[in-house]
Image (tube, rainbow, N blue to C red):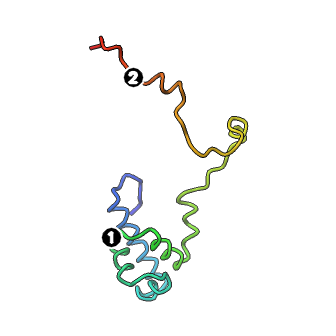
């Protein structure tokens, strides 16, 4: 199944589990072998492959054991600063604040005589 980003978390977990299981089988690994390589219990791997929620650290361990950890770079790409960011901010931004213009355009304040 192709993930489009509109699926709920349970559907994504199930698809992730199915893909991990397919990759494990294609690599001719048993659940016990993959669990040992990943440093997790076989029952944790069974839960992961069945689409149940497990700690993210365990998912990373399994991806590492399957030589898929480099694909995380595709999932969340590193943000590059544009030259104009250095001019505007002088350094890499650490947070975002609303501007005074945004606060003035906020329609939450009223005189009280509006209907």
Residue found at the very far left of the displayed protein: 115
Q: Position of residue 111 (x, y in %)?
A: 35, 13
Task: Point out residue 99 in the picture as x, y percentages from the top left corner.
Answer: 54, 29
- Residue 42 occupies which quadrant of the picture? bottom left
Q: Is residue 32 left or right of residue 96?
A: left
Q: Is residue 9 above or below residue 19?
A: above
Quadrant the N terminus occupies: bottom left
Is residue 17 or residue 102 the one in the foreground? 102
Residue occupying the point 46% across, 77% down:
23
> Vertically, is 31 above or below 98?
below
The residue furthest top is 113
Q: Residue at x 30, y 11 (%)?
A: 113
Query: Where residue 60 sits in the image (x, y, percent)?
Result: 50, 71
| Structural crowding at the residue carrying mark 2, measured as other residues with C-alpha within 10 Å and reported as few (<14), some (14–19) or many (≥20) | few
In the rendered structure, find residue 107 and report the number of the disc placed on it.
2
The residue where tag 1 is placed is: 52
* Label 2 SS: loop
The count of marks equals 2
- Of marks 2 and 1, the one in the foreground: 2
Disc 1: CA contacts within 10 A as few (<14), some (14-19) or many (>=20): some
* Residue in the foreground of this view, choosing between 69 and 19: 69
> Is 44 positioned to the left or the right of 93 in the image?
left
Q: Is residue 114 above or below residue 57?
A: above
Label 2 to label 1: alpha-carbon separation: 43 Å
Contact flag, marks 2 and 1 (Cβ < 8 Å): no
Image x and y of residue 46, in percent: 35, 79
Of mark 2 and mark 1, the one earlier in the sequence is 1
Quadrant of the image containing the C terminus: top left
Please tell me which residue is depicted at 66% across the width and 46% down the height of the picture. Answer: 92
Q: Quadrant of residue 64?
A: bottom right
Q: Is residue 54 above or below residue 25?
A: above
Kindly state the secondary structure of the residue where label 1 is placed. loop
């Amino acid at each position: 199944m192709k993930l489009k980003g509109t699926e709920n978390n349970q559907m994504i977990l199930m698809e992730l589990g199915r893909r991990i299981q397919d990759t494990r089988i294609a690599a001719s690994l048993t659940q016990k072998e993959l669990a040992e390589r990943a440093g997790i219990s076989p029952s944790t791997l069974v839960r992961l492959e069945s689409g149940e929620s497990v700690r993210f650290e365990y998912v990373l361990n399994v991806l590492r054991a399957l030589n898929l950890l480099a694909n995380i770079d595709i999932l969340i790409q590193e943000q590059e600063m544009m030259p104009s960011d250095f001019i505007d901010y002088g350094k890499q931004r650490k947070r975002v604040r609303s501007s005074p213009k945004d606060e003035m355009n906020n329609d939450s304040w009223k005189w009280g005589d509006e209907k």
